[in-house]
Image (spheres, rainbow, N blue to C red):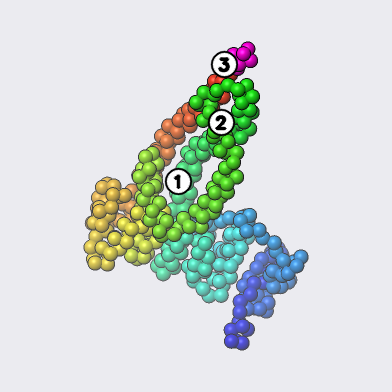
Amino acid sequence: MAAAAATAVKKFAYEARDGSGKVRKDTMEAPNSQAVAARLRERGFTVLQVEEAGGTGLNMELTIPGLGEKIGLKDIAIMSRQLATMIGAGLSLIRAMTILTEQTENKALQKVLSEVRTDVETGKAFSVALARHPQVFPPLMINMVKAGEIGGFLDQVLVSIAENFETEVALRGKIKSAMTYPVVVFFIAVLAVTAMLLFIVPVFADMFKNLGGELPLPTQILVSLSAILKVGAVPFAIAIFVGAVWWKKNKNRLEVRNRVEPVYLKLPVFGGLIQKIAVSRFTRNFGAMVRSGVPILQALDIVGQASGNIVIERATKDVQDSVRRGESLAGPLAKHTVFPPMVVQMIAVGEDTGALDTMLDKIADFYDQEVESTTEQLTSLIEPLMIAFLGTIIGGMVIALYMPIFKVFDLIGS
């Protein structure tokens, strides 16, 4: 017990001067400050200061959960591209990681890279060091790096990872771009309707009540909705907030995914788009892992989870069972309607010709183009529909409010 406590790893902050005279500040994990100083001297640094990171009171680093910098897929793609370039140019992994840590602008990623570099310096494999941060580095990347380490082509694997993630980032960007307009218009409509029901309709309702006239049916409905919203606005807002929190916490649970994700594929307008995105992601990730030398069964397990849809994940489990029995990949896919016949046939040809990774890449490229075309069509279709929707809602409310005005003069005269 005492020995274990003595060798416990702690985090130390250090200042050191490199060979060019530049002072560097960073952190390193080690059993004690002497070990940190020894490692820095081995790297040719002059140690200026080493102290345990963190602290209490005014020296303690303050972090607010949810407000720190986030590490996105784009950050990982850029990191992989830069690392591949440096390793391909002949730099050692540790040297490349040091440079990468210094030039990374994302502070959260900089901290993670520093810890990964420290693990590599202490003798851990690069894939093992990455695996210690599963919330940052996807399983796809970790397993591809592991295959590259074993095969001796880490730089090529990192290029493949970068290309894969860059394509995924571009795809997400196109989808977000297409969805931004309708989402903004929808929220404007909700805010406008809510404001009218809470602040404008009650004024008209009081005026009509004082005049003693009988309201037309559309106006009566509007006044009733206003009364309901005045009472239920706060409970409704709380219910939405609670629902959002519950969804964020439980959306990845298996029972929730089994109920919700198959419904996504059956949506009238967006179901086809979601299917194309899932198939594109599955084939591109699968092709990248096959090309990197990751074992088929292991690759299938990872790409199924990375596809983002439980329907494709189930299909990959059937494929895994088929491969274990020595059968084909394409056979089980034909039983799942989420995979179009073209995809099944191209995978079968790829198996027969020994060019599975190339065929998977072609499928992914095709569906990427399909996704781009579909999003453009949806955008051109949704824009006028949303404008008509917003105009109908607001215009209908205004008409309902002003319908009784025509009777006001008669009421005043009487």
Spatial separation of the CA atoms under disc 3 and disc 2:
18 Å
Place of residue 267 in the rendered image (x, y in percent of width and height, measured from the top left) = 38, 43
Would you call the spot at circle 2 few (<14 residues within 10 Å), some (14-19), or many (20 or more)?
many
The kind of residue tagged 1 is Leu
Query: CB of mark 2 within 8 Å of CB of mark 1?
Result: no
Please, is residue 164 above or below residue 25 in the view? above
Spatial separation of the CA atoms under disc 2 and disc 1:
45 Å
Instruction: Please state the extent of the stretch shown in magenta in the rendering.
Output: 408-414
Would residue 5 be found to the left or right of residue 304 on screen? right
Would residue 291 be found to the left or right of residue 215 on screen? left
Q: Nearer the viewer, residue 53 or 316?
A: 316
Residue 69 among those drawn in magenta: no
The residue pinned by badge 1 equals 171
The kind of residue tagged 3 is Phe
The residue drawn where x is 59% and y is 41% is 231
- What element does badge 2 sit on? helix
Majority secondary structure of magenta residues: helix
Q: Quadrant of the N terminus?
A: bottom right
